[in-house]
Image (spheres, rainbow, N blue to C red):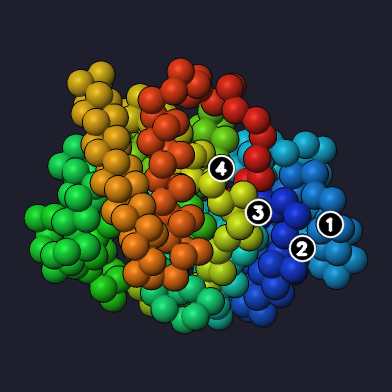
C-alpha cells in the first residue's frame, strides 16, 4: 500500500510548462523524510502542461479546472483534494532546493504552535529575494511612498513594511510570508479557512497571513530551508495590467481589514506615491539621463496607476476580466 502522505504539495499552473517541469523535477529529487503527494491544478493551459506532467510524472495527480479560475480558487481546489498533515503551496516557477521541505516540516514538528512557515527565497541570479513583509499600515505605507525605507535602509523606524534592515539570515516570526512558497499546518488551515477566492490574483497572501495571525497561528521564516523563485512567468505577458491588478488587490485588502478612515488614508498615500514617481520618472525620461526603456515603463506604469485611482472604474473583483494566475 502507498504511504499516507505527510505533506501535500499543491502547484497551480497556467501555461508555464517549462517552469512547471523544472519545479516537479526538483521535488522528485528531494528524498524528503516525510512522504509527499503532489497535486498540479491546471487552469486551462494551452501549452501542453498537463500532458507533459502526465507523461513524465506518473505519481503526480493533475486536476484540470477547465477555466482560468485564479490563484486562490485553484489552490483551494488542490487543498480540498489533498490529504497531508501539511499543505505546501508552491508556485510553478519555483525550484525547491534539497532538504527544503524536510527542514520546514522539522521546524513545524518542533514548534506545534506555528501555523505556517516559509523558506529563504533566492532569485535566478542567486541573490536574496525579500519574501517577508510587515502588515501594511498608514505609517509604513507613507514611508514606502516617499522611499524613506530605501533612503535609510538600516532604520527600523522607516522600514516596517519591506524590512530592508533585516538580512533574512535568521529564524524569525514575521507578519507576511510571500505566497510563492508556503507550508501550512492542516490543523491551522482547518481553523483559519481556505484562501479568500474574492482575491483573483495578489492580495490573497496578505489576507491569509493576517487571518492566520488573527486565529492565533504565528508565521515563521526558516532561513536554513531554501528555494529559487524565477518569477515573472505570467506577469511578463502583461506587466502594466499586472501592476494595476496588484494595486486593486491592495485596496481590496484594506477594505477588508481596515476602517473607512484608514482606507481613505491609504488612498491618499497611494496617490502621493504614484504622483511622485510619475513626476520623477517623467523628468528623468525627458532629460535622457538614463536608458529610456526602463524609465519610460516606470513613468507609464505610475501614470496609469494614478489615472486608475481617480477613475470611476469599479474596483470590485467581479468587475475585472480574467488574467493569468501568478
> Is there any visible trace of residue 31 in the rendered image?
yes
User: Tag on residue 17?
Assistant: 2
Q: Which residue is mark 4?
A: 241
Asked if marks 1 and 2 touch (Cβ < 8 Å), the reply is yes
Residue at the front extreme?
287
Give the x, y percent position of residue 111: 33, 60
Badge 1: few (under 14), some or many (20 or more) residues near its Cα, within 10 Å?
Answer: few
Rendered view: 306 above or below 279: above
Tell me the quarter of the picture where residue 242 sits: top right
Q: Which residue is mark 3?
A: 237
Q: CA distance from mark 3 to mark 4?
A: 9 Å
Q: Which residue is mark 1?
A: 47
Q: Secondary structure at mark 4?
A: helix
Residue located 32% across and 42% down the image: 274
Tell me the quarter of the picture where residue 88 sits: bottom right
User: Tag on residue 37?
Assistant: none
Which one is in front in this view, the residue at disc 4 or the one at disc 1? 4
Q: Secondary structure at mark 2?
A: helix
Q: CA distance from mark 1 to mark 2?
A: 7 Å
Residue located 29% across and 41% down the image: 275
Q: CA distance from mark 2 to mark 4?
A: 22 Å
**Which circle's residue, 1 or 2, is located before the other in the chain?**
2
Rendered view: 112 above or below 55: above
> Is there any visible trace of residue 209 in the rendered image?
no
Asked if marks 2 and 3 touch (Cβ < 8 Å), the reply is no
**Which circle's residue, 4 or 1, is located before the other in the chain?**
1
Asked if marks 3 and 4 touch (Cβ < 8 Å), the reply is no
Residue located 50% across and 21% down the image: 313
Q: Secondary structure at mark 3?
A: helix
Tell me the quarter of the picture where residue 66 sits: top right
Q: CA distance from mark 1 to mark 3?
A: 15 Å
Amino acid at each position: 500500500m502507498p504511504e499516507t502522505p505527510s505533506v501535500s504539495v499543491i502547484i497551480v499552473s497556467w501555461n508555464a510548462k517549462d517552469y512547471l517541469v523544472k519545479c516537479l523535477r526538483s521535488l522528485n529529487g528531494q528524498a524528503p523524510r516525510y512522504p509527499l503527494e503532489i497535486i498540479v491544478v491546471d487552469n486551462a493551459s494551452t501549452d501542453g502542461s498537463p500532458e507533459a506532467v502526465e507523461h513524465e510524472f506518473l505519481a503526480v495527480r493533475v486536476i484540470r479546472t477547465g477555466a482560468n479560475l485564479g490563484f486562490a480558487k485553484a489552490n483551494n481546489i488542490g487543498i480540498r483534494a489533498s490529504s497531508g498533515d501539511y499543505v505546501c503551496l508552491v508556485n510553478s516557477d519555483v525550484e525547491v532546493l534539497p532538504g527544503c521541505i524536510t527542514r520546514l516540516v522539522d521546524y513545524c514538528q518542533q514548534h506545534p504552535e506555528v501555523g505556517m512557515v516559509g523558506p529563504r527565497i533566492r532569485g535566478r541570479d542567486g541573490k536574496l529575494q525579500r519574501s517577508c513583509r510587515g502588515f501594511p499600515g498608514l505609517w509604513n505605507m507613507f514611508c514606502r511612498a516617499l522611499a524613506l525605507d530605501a533612503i535609510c535602509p538600516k532604520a527600523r523606524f522607516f522600514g516596517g513594511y519591506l524590512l530592508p534592515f533585516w538580512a533574512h539570515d535568521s529564524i524569525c516570526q514575521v507578519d507576511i510570508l510571500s505566497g510563492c512558497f508556503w507550508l501550512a499546518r492542516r490543523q491551522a488551515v482547518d481553523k483559519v479557512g481556505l484562501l479568500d477566492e474574492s482575491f483573483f490574483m495578489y492580495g490573497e497572501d496578505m489576507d491569509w497571513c493576517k487571518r492566520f495571525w488573527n486565529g492565533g497561528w504565528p508565521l515563521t521564516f526558516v532561513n536554513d530551508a531554501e528555494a529559487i523563485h524565477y518569477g515573472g512567468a505570467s506577469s511578463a505577458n502583461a506587466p502594466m495590467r499586472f501592476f494595476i491588478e496588484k494595486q486593486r488587490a491592495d485596496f481590496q485588502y484594506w477594505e477588508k481589514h481596515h476602517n473607512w478612515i484608514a482606507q481613505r488614508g491609504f488612498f491618499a498615500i497611494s496617490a502621493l506615491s504614484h504622483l511622485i514617481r510619475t513626476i520623477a520618472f517623467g523628468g528623468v525620461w525627458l532629460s535622457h539621463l538614463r536608458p529610456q526603456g526602463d524609465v519610460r515603463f516606470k513613468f507609464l506604469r505610475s501614470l496609469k496607476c494614478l489615472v486608475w485611482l481617480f477613475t470611476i472604474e469599479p474596483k470590485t473583483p467581479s468587475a475585472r476580466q480574467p488574467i493569468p494566475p501568478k
